[in-house]
Amino acid sequence: MGIEKDFLMRQLMLLFEVIQKILRLRKTGDKKRAFGQIKYFYELLKIDDDIDSMGIERLLEFLEKDKNLVNEQIEMVAFVLKEQGELSENRDKKLDFFRKSYFLLQKVERESITFSMDRQMKLAELKEWIN
C-alpha cells in the first residue's frame, strides 16, 4: 500500500509540473510546444485513446473504470482539457473541451473531502464559458 501511495504522489507531482509547463507555454503563445506537453501529459497517464472524440459520460467511465484514475488524477485531466479548450481555435471544439472539463471538475468537487479554491475558480470560469 505504501509503495502505491508513493508512486501516486510522485506521478501527481510530475503531472502538476507538466500542467504548469502547458500553462506557461499557452500564455507565451507557444502553442506547438504546449500541444507537445499535452501529449506528454496523456502519455504519462498511459492514455492513448482519443478522448477528444469521447462523450462526457464515456470519458468519465474510461478514466475511472478503464484507467483506474483517482479523483486527483481526474482533476488534472480536467485542467488539461481546459487548457486544450483555451488553445483551440474552433469554437465548437473549445466548448466541447470546456464542457468535459467542467463535468469532470464537478464530479471531483462532489466527491472531494477537501476544499480547493483553484477548483472553484476553474468551475466558475468554465461555467461562464459554457453559459
Image (spheres, rainbow, N blue to C red):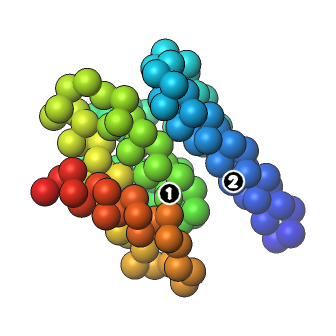
Q: Position of residue 38 (x, y in %)?
A: 52, 31
Mark identifier at residue 130: none
Screen quadrant of the N terminus: bottom right
Residue highlighted by disc 2: 12
User: Does label 2 or label 1 sit earlier along the sequence?
Assistant: 2
| Residue 56, placed above or below residue 103 | above
CA–CA distance in space, label 2 to label 1: 11 Å
Residue in front for this viewpoint, 64 or 29: 29
Residue highlighted by disc 1: 74
Q: Is residue 52 left or right of residue 27?
A: left
Q: Residue at x 50, y 64 (%)?
A: 118
Q: Residue at x 50, y 71 (%)?
A: 117
Residue in front for this viewpoint, 5 or 79: 79
Amino acid type indicated by mark 1? Ile
Q: Position of residue 49 (x, y in %)?
A: 43, 33
Q: Residue at x 46, y 65 (%)?
A: 119
Amino acid type indicated by mark 2? Leu
Q: Position of residue 45 (x, y in %)?
A: 60, 42
Q: Residue at x 58, y 62 (%)?
A: 72
The answer to whether the residue labelled 2 contacts the one labelled 1, judged by CB atoms less than 8 Å apart, is no
Dividing the picture into quarters, in which one does residue 33 lie? Answer: top right
